[in-house]
Image (cartoon, helix red, strand yellow):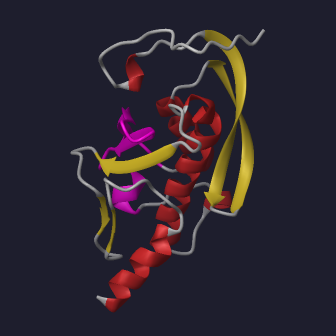
Amino acid sequence: QNQETSEPESATPSNTLSNTQPEEKNETISLYIGTNGNFKTYAYPFSATPTPEAVIAAIAETSGWKLPVTEVTTSGRGGYIVSFAKSGTLFTGNASAKAEFATENKQQLFQNILDSVQKTLQTVFAQESMGEPELKIFYRDETGAPLTFSDLGITIPVEQAYSPNMWEYLSNQNAQG
């Protein structure tokens, strides 16, 4: 029994998504792991309606990446802002992924992580995308600062929705330096 409502079940002044209580139901979602245009799909069962934090934790469990999230909030720009803890793979560079998810270098690893989180969140939560045609995903660290990969010379801007295409542009910007 799938019931759709046009109004949110709880309207609170807080924009932190983790404050909402998921309704009890068994649900299997698709996790998309890989990079733009080259994703593999993995079925993942949930005993309750998944939250963005739970979906990211499922990606971490499936891939072996360490993806601690300090919070996921709604953005006034039609999407989610995902704040990653500095103890995770994005900051340590320590892949520790399962063999199936091994990458050739750090840039590929970081791109796989961000592309996977973006694609999966967009697919799972698109119907709740605040009226936008596409759910936008913004990334930052636990302090609210941009994700900065200093050894690659790449910074993912906080104020700009993430796009898998930004890696090529940011890499070229760094090369022109």
- Please state if 122 lies on the left or on the right of 93 as rendered: right
Between residue 76 and residue 60, name the one nearer to us.
76
- Please state if 2 lies on the left or on the right of 6 as rendered: right
Split into 4 quadrants, where in the image is the N terminus?
top right
- Residue drawn at x 42%, y 61% is 94
- As displayed, is residue 47 above or below residue 172? above
- Residue drawn at x 45%, y 56% is 162
Q: Is residue 64 visible?
A: no
Q: Residue 117 location in percent, x, y?
A: 53, 47
- On whether residue 14 falls in the magenta region, the answer is no
Q: Quadrant of residue 134?
A: top right
- Residue drawn at x 34%, y 90% is 176
Q: Residue 52 location in percent, x, y?
A: 50, 32
Magenta residues, start to end: 66-93
Q: Residue 141 location in percent, x, y?
A: 29, 49
- Please state if 113 lies on the left or on the right of 19 as rendered: right
Between residue 67 and residue 27, name the one nearer to us.
27
- As displayed, is residue 167 above or below residue 137? below
